Amino acid sequence: MAAAVVALLLTAAFGLWVTFHFGGITLSERIDDLGEAVVAFAAALVCGAAALRHVGRSRRAWLLISASAFAWSIGEAVWSYYEVGLGRQVPFPSPADAGFLGAVPLAAGGIVLFSAARRRAVVRLATVLDSLIIAGSLLAVSWTTILKTIYSHGANNLFAQAISLAYPISDVVILTMLLLLLSGRVRARDRVSLSLLAAGLLANLLADSGFAYLTTVNSYGPAQPIDTGWVAGYLLIALAGFRAWLLPVDPPQPKEQAPSRWQLFLPYIPMAAAVVASSVDALISGSVDNFLFYDLVIVVMLVVIRQFMMFSDNTTLNDRLQEQTAALQRSEEHLRSLVEHSSDAATLADGYGVIRFQSASVQRLFAFAPGELVGTRLVDLAHIDDRPALLNCLSDALKASAHPTSVTCRLRHKLGTWTYCEVTVTNLLYLPSVEGLIVNIRDVTDRKELEEKVSHQAGHDPLTNLANRSSFRNALEQAIEHLEPGRSISVLIVDVDDFKSVNEALGSELGDQLLTAVAARLEQIIPADALAARLRSDEFAILLLNTTIFEAGPLAESIIERFAGRFRAGQTEVVMHVSVGGAELVPGEETGSDLLRNADHALRTAKAKGRARYQRYEPDMRIKGNLPDAA
């Protein structure tokens, strides 16, 4: 902001000085010549610094703008040498014209490089045609305003005439480049600096045109007000370079963007101006100027060529778009078919777990219509015991974008039953095209039943369906681990008396039926919180929680009594008896193995005393049981 204010004050001061000639014409002439050279040289330095700040196309563009300003400052320095150093009028043409005119192609090249995107070959060719259309149109306008006058007054000196014509023609080139720059899309970060650059070049253009006209009619002299245009122009260019110097290093070039509507019509505005200028000239002169006629014919031909080329390109793009649209529709139909006929239910939920969409598969899985559950919280469909796990799954998904999280839970069927499902949640909230949670629901009832069956078989006896020895040991160890002070654990071991003889007499098939009947009767007798297990062929165990050995006695007696009845195996009835041994855990001193061994000692003692007896464990039983081993 401060730099802009300084530039404005300098321009105003310079304009007042060269207009009112404070201090005399000689001082004003020196300030005019030296001021223009210094300002142009300063603009060259600032634009050079901006080039060093950037990379790629922007660096090359600012280097060319810097070189253009430097060339113009050299031309002005030569001009000043004539007027200030030698004290005589600058001849026309002079060596200074080389610097002035040499600045034009450098500036034009810099403008061309300020492209915001890479373009297709057809678009680049259209840009070239636009350039020619604009240049031809501006040439017609320039001919009616300046060029015709310069041409008619310079007929006696061909070289001077060429130089005189070169200035307005170079202005046409610069104005063409500026219109192309404005008709294309520039990056937002470059908009201010390029606008300042365009304003500076436009100010120079106006000053050049005025200089060419005044020189042609021999009206240009030292310290003219029109010289303020060059000072203002190069101060604006310096501001543009300073603004670009403040920007960070160039980011990657964006992709090609479609121009806006007014940018499409902008190249044709000069053409309309050319038609108006030519019409006015014809009305004033009473005839059509030959140069204008052929110039406009060429411009119209270029417009026709451009329109035909763009029509052909649009047709090609439209055909390609139709092909891509058809391919996209086929892909969407394929995807929709996969989703609709999938055995899984695809669900889209928002960040709060509220259902926004469900595939048709939800009707096959849960009997709900596809849109019936929209607006329902997913967690409300889960079994109350499974809701915490589902909430944790949703929470984990929100923390891990695009990383699927899964949970197995029970979801409600429309009929009120529960279905075991595997729910997989993927967070795609970050995708603008989705902005939701993708929830895939799979019915895993069969798998769950199989898992439970395998787990049950791993822990149960296949014949009696009681817990097996391994499962019983695990339950015993867990009970001991969680035993509270003042509580007791007891174990009863039940053995079927003389089962071996019965099994041999009846056969193994009937023997298995007897064992199944024994297990069933045992489960009927024991308390609900007790655990019955089959340890060996005809040996069973009962785990009694919170029960002392004395409290277990009545249960043992009841078992012996209930087993005194008859058992049916096929068509045969068998009278069987059992012996029971029991032991109580001594907390802190015994393990589960010790407890089972003690109960086994008690069982041996009971069987040694006869059938159908109960014996609780006594400490001396271990000593007696070990005597044969010691011997």
Image: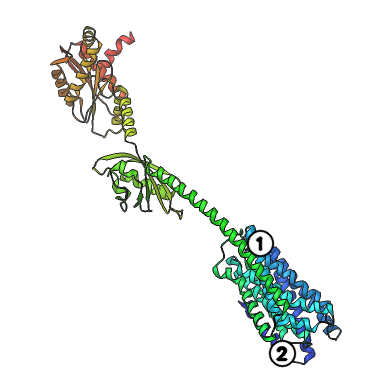
Q: Quadrant of residue 513?
A: top left
Picture layout, residue 535 above or below residue 375 = above
Choose the circle earlier in sequence order: 1 or 2.
2
Badge 2 is on which residue?
19
Nearer to the camera, 282 or 345: 282
Q: Is residue 48 left or right of residue 409?
A: right
**x and y percentages locating residue 39 in the rendered image:** 73, 78
Note whether residue 177 is visible: no
Q: Quadrant of the C terminus?
A: top left
Q: Residue at x 74, y 81 (%)?
A: 148
- The N terminus lies in quadrant: bottom right
Amino acid under disc 1: Leu
Disc 2 is placed on an element classified as helix
Q: Which residue is mark 1?
A: 125
Q: Residues within 10 Å of mark 2 (few under 14, many from 20)?
A: some
Of all residues shown, which one is farthest toward the front?
287
